[in-house]
Image: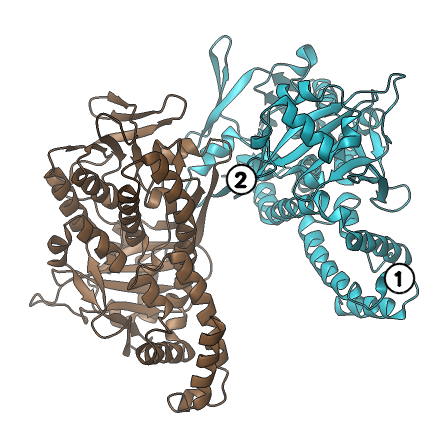
Chain colours: A cyan, B brown
């Protein structure tokens, strides 16, 4: 591949990862054809209603910087320095995500995608082909077909390089799934989600603290809200599909109103369009996709959700996909664009990280909907912050490793498990709740734990 | 469904489970159309070379009895009362599977399938349509299509009842996999297998003990052999695809011969056609398929490998599929053939058993290729048999629960894990190896374990 005459590639999918990767390839001088099922975002706007807002964190920013588009995005992003927990009674308490100055950033999926497509289009070598539905990959011929549905015209590509960034339900991956020794799993949660909204205040401002991710944790379900630049919030209700308290049970407007009045009264007061939103927006499902290998014959590579679709509870789906781009770009430097070496190494090193962030995202659902309301959990968070500030070399909390570092997810998960053991020990100290800042046993056990980790 | 005018059903797949289930439905007065991709076994014989011999055990026999075809099969089955372990040096040692008189039975897949198709054909309501390839299921229309490849004629069925017994790579299941909230996983072992053979002795007899399943355990790989009625043995080599000792490394006839000479010298002496077999037979892969739900709208039901494909190491793949038939037949009695109640209940109760036997089969690979050669494992087997004989009410070894009982697989797996703890305790008793039959501590700990289990 290193000595191929023409540097060209096909990307299936002009979503966040596909369009960002087009930029990175274009910067290397590749001619890139990007095919996308949906209509051109630049003309028609974006079909919404099924996607929670996105939270950009350090891994995402790094990739955007690499592609030279971070400044564009930063203008519209809203920092969220922590979680704002809403109790049943409407009391609010703030839990910072990290140190002073650290934050994750709320961005709109449509705005970000549009900016990336526009930035990619600025490269003369990049062409976008919208309204072209991928009809799968023919492994024997190395052929990928795209159908322009309006004209029924078919484009057949036989690319030397095909990057499949076509999402959780990837058509390219579906073809690979039929290959022997392709490991694949799709696992749905028994929870659905529905997008709702809090409109701007009459004057145009935000009706809740804008610089926070709002959570109404209610045990086995929850409501969250992320700020938008126009003063509104995008809310998402996560609720079991079936069971005593579930979407299945919310069959009338009256039942929906009673449900919100009972569990989210303070949010309800800010949601004049609740019933309209609830009835108009679909109830979507939550899937985790894992597979292996991520490449086929050094010609096809799965990226982003096509390789590792995860649930949204760590805010890392997009960040993980963007980090795929950064890491591939690193490998392209390391191996002088020899894809016969890049693809196997990416496959060998990155799948463990995809699995780790999938696990972390599932864990975080329990944390968000339940634990954040637990005094013991809040105590742990305070102790984490205290330790991180006093012993920055020895201790970085799991959340910070995931959101504010570039430590591989698999290492973060392993460290996180070790931290669980540390806090099980610390929180079992007698009277620790009252005196942890001064109890020498806390520092002694922490010291022993650090030493034990070598 | 209970009051539908005509009792009819479509079965996709005339393999072991599909043809047995056709018999059970026919006995209930159903008109059954069975579609099968392969040519009619009754005319053309059976394409072999990719299937190890099958081991029928109690669950399988029970289903065959229910269908009234057990006598037919029993005539050709060869009992295997235990494992014959072959050491590197050619020494043989016998490990019984259960009590005196208990055995699993070697049967040929082709003979059994043929007998079942013939028995089903004897019912006037059953028709077989061979050389019809299932082209998937259309969930919206409830339509299943079969293509007769030679004539290119297509049959479209819209059955009220579709039973998908179309195997590990089920076309019907592939359609359900695209449904939201359909959980699915396919996981391949890094091992392949290749069928080989030991021909009959010159006089026509068996060259090895016929009433045993022969194993050459070699740590991370193994050879096995099952007796056939004609005096031959069907052998299967299980070996990693890649690595220091692997199929990848056996690239020449000379390397194959050296490999067998080194690891299986006594078997090699009985395999005059080794090289021909090795080069002529494919290297097949080993997949575990799990999914949920197993039914769709009370119209489609996945059965056998289509619902729960497992690796062959517990000899339970066919037995589990046959047990599906028995259990469905029980439910058909319980609910007067109301499939709207049968399918959900089968789905709710049986999936845990499918997952359990999948786990047990994976565990047993380690047992067969490695543990059987371990003196500690042999000691455990002896103690198991001793306890089972002395305390038949309190103790049934895991292998017996799986092979010689009808205890649900999920309960067998849970009991098996409890037994692991028992033997961890018993085998840690000082000097137990020498004196276990008389050491009172053995009986004391066993008594405490029984008591603890309630």
Question: Of callouts 2 and 1, which one flags the residue occurring earlier in the amino acid sequence?
Answer: 2
Dot 1: within a 10 Å radius of its alpha carbon, few (fewer than 14), some, or many (20 or more) residues?
few
Residue at image point 91% right, 58% down = A390
Residue toward you, B63 or B129: B63
| Quadrant in the picture for residue B133 | top left
| Quadrant in the picture for residue B396 | bottom left
The chain carrying label 1 is: A
Dividing the image into 4 quarters, which one contains the N terminus of chain A?
top right
Q: Secondary structure at mark 1?
A: helix
Percent position of residue A44, x then y: 66, 11
Q: Is residue B162 above or below residue B256?
A: above
Check residue A184 in the rendering and tell me which mark sits there, or answer none. Answer: none
Dividing the image into 4 quarters, which one contains the C terminus of chain A?
bottom right
Q: Secondary structure at mark 2?
A: strand
Percent position of residue A87, x then y: 79, 40
Relative side of B281 to B108, left or right: right
Q: Is residue A369 above or below residue B139?
A: below
**Residue that numbered label 2 is attached to:** A295
Residue B130 in view here: no
**Residue that numbered label 1 is attached to:** A434
Percent position of residue B258, x then y: 33, 66
Residue toward you, B359 or B99: B99
Q: Is residue B333 above or below residue A445?
A: above
Residue at image point 17% right, 35% down = B29
Residue toward you, A78 or A232: A232
Residue at image point 59% right, 18% down = A38
Marks 2 & 1, CB-CB < 8 Å contact: no
């Amino acid at each position: 591949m290193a000595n191929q005459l023409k540097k060209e590639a096909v990307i299936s999918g002009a979503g966040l990862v596909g369009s960002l990767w087009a930029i990175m390839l274009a910067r290397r001088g590749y001619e890139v054809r990007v095919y996308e099922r949906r209509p051109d975002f630049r003309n028609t706007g974006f079909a919404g209603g099924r996607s929670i807002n996105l939270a950009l964190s350090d891994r995402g920013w790094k990739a955007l910087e690499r592609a030279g588009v971070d400044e564009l995005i930063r203008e519209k992003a809203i920092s969220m320095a922590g979680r704002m927990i809403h109790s049943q009674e409407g009391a609010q308490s703030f839990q910072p995500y990290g140190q002073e100055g650290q934050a994750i950033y709320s961005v709109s999926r449509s705005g970000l995608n549009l900016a990336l497509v526009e930035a990619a289009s600025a490269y003369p070598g990049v062409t976008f082909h919208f309204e072209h539905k991928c009809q799968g990959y023919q492994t024997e011929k190395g052929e990928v077909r795209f159908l322009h549905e309006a004209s029924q015209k078919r484009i057949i590509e036989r690319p030397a390089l095909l990057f499949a960034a076509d999402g959780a339900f990837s058509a390219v991956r579906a073809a690979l799934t039929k290959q022997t020794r392709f490991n694949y799993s799709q696992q749905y949660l028994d929870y659905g989600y529905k997008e709702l909204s809090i409109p701007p205040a009459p004057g145009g401002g935000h009706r809740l603290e804008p610089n926070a991710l709002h959570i109404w944790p209610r045990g086995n379900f929850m409501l969250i809200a992320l700020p938008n630049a126009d003063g509104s919030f995008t809310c998402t209700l996560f609720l079991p599909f079936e069971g005593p308290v579930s979407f299945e049970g919310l069959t009338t407007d009256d039942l929906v109103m009673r449900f919100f009045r009972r569990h989210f009264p303070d949010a309800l007061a800010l949601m004049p369009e609740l019933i309209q939103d609830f009835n108009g927006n679909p109830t979507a499902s939550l899937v985790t996709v894992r597979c292996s290998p991520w490449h086929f014959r050094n010609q096809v590579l799965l990226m982003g959700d096509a390789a590792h679709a995860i649930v949204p509870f760590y805010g890392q789906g997009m960040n993980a996909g963007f980090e795929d781009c950064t890491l591939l770009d690193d490998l392209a430097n390391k191996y002088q664009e020899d894809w016969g070496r890049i693809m196997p190494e990416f496959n060998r090193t990155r799948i463990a990280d995809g699995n780790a962030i999938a696990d972390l995202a599932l864990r975080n659902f329990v944390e968000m909907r339940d634990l954040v309301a637990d005094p013991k959990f809040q105590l742990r968070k305070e102790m984490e912050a205290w330790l991180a500030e006093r012993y920055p070399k020895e201790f970085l909390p799991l959340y910070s490793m995931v959101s504010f570092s570039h430590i591989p997810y698999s290492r973060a998960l392993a460290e996180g498990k070790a931290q669980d053991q540390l806090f099980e020990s610390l929180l079992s100290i007698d009277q620790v709740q009252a005196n942890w800042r001064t109890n020498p046993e806390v520092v002694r056990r922490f010291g022993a734990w650090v030493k034990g980790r070598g």
